[in-house]
Amino acid sequence: MATIEKRVGGDGAVTYRVKVRLKGHAPETASFDRRTDAKEWAQRIEADIKAGRHFGTSKRHTLAELLDRYEQSELSKLKSARTVKAKLDWWRRHHGEKMLSEMTRDIIAKARDDLQATPKQRGSGQRSAADVNRTLAALSSVCSFAVKELGWLDRNPLELVNKPSENKGRVRFLSSEELPRFLQACRESTNSHLYLAVVLALTTGARQSEVMGLRWPQIDFARRTALLGDSKNGDARSLPLSGDAIRLLRERATVVAVDDNRLFPPKQGSKSPYLDLRAPFKAALNSAGIVDFHWHDLRHTAASYLAMAGTSPLMISKILGQRTMAMVARYSHLAPESVVELGDLLATRMGVE
């Protein structure tokens, strides 16, 4: 539906402002000197919108402009802002000059294929399907912002683009032979923080950012817990503090710095929010003769040992802070005996044992 409003300026000049409104589409407006031109424009815009030929404001803004607006308004709200920013920068470098109307399904699909063919940001080889999907997801969030908040797009073009299939996920954990060797190497490390950080990761299953970002007010010695009030998935949860972890924390609590309440404060001048342990961690792995192991695998190690101890997948998901069971299912093969025990229990309850 179109409305035309006659306007008279201070100099007596007459203009006609026309606005086209159709359900499901952002309003379009324009001004003309003649009423007949306004009517013709309104009729043409209505016909183009109904026929799917009209892109509206998407013809007046570039992807770079949209990225600027999104980063100014939304990026700081994300826990993974730095990671998302890096992925948005890829879109800015390769497609920032394009008008939003040009960011069609075919263009984005071609960008997806180009992205898959580019090398990893770190290391060698091509990007993983997971990395490609996270880069597509970053752009999808931006386009959703353009649809819902700005009205610069009628729909999110990423909805029409297929995502590459991801691997089920890497599960690497320390074996019963590797674990004691690695822990001993961490104890002997010249870095006084490494052993505590590793023990916390192994005994809580927490993410690296959750462990390294801990602050003393989060530690409850009476309950032997550390409260995560703002975890990755947004849910609060408590980490159990046991064994060497609680012992070392009690020792350190007597010498807490008055101007910094972080458990692992970064070195002076560092841009990181917490201490960088990559070098001592790698040195400990080399000393223990352990290969193909990353910090995140400490989390896998915790989950794997819980599964082998017969802990239910539901409890593992609670401990790890996973909202869905899909990520926990990868550990189910480590506890086949628990499945048999459940079968025996069911047979007994039904009287068919």
Image (cartoon, rainbow, N blue to C red):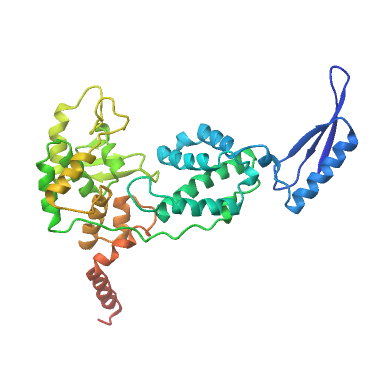
Q: Position of residue 89 (x, y in %)?
A: 47, 39
Q: Is residue 198 left or right of residue 347?
A: left
Quadrant of the rendering where the N terminus is positioned: top right
Front residue (pair 321, 170):
170
Identify the residue at image location x=28%, y=46%.
206
| Placement of 86 over or under 266, stated as above or below | below
Determine the residue located farthest toward the top in the rendered image. 11
Q: Tell me the quarter of the picture where residue 315 sits.
A: bottom left
Is residue 102 among what the camera can see?
A: yes
Determine the residue located farthest toward the bottom in the rendered image. 352
Front residue (pair 294, 341):
294
Q: Position of residue 327 (x, y in %)?
A: 35, 57
Front residue (pair 90, 207):
90
Q: Is residue 181 left or right of residue 138?
A: left
| Placement of 313 over or under 339, stated as above or below | above
Q: How many marks?
A: 0
Q: Tell me the quarter of the picture where residue 84 sits.
A: top left
Q: Is residue 117 left or right of residue 98?
A: left
| Placement of 145 over or under 320, stated as above or below | above
Identify the residue at image location x=23%, y=40%.
278
Q: Position of residue 119 (x, y in %)?
A: 40, 49
Quadrant of the rendering where the C terminus is positioned: bottom left
Q: Position of residue 225 (x, y in %)?
A: 23, 42
Identify the residue at image location x=29%, y=56%.
316
| Placement of 299 over or under 63, stated as above or below | below
Is residue 79 among what the camera can see?
A: no
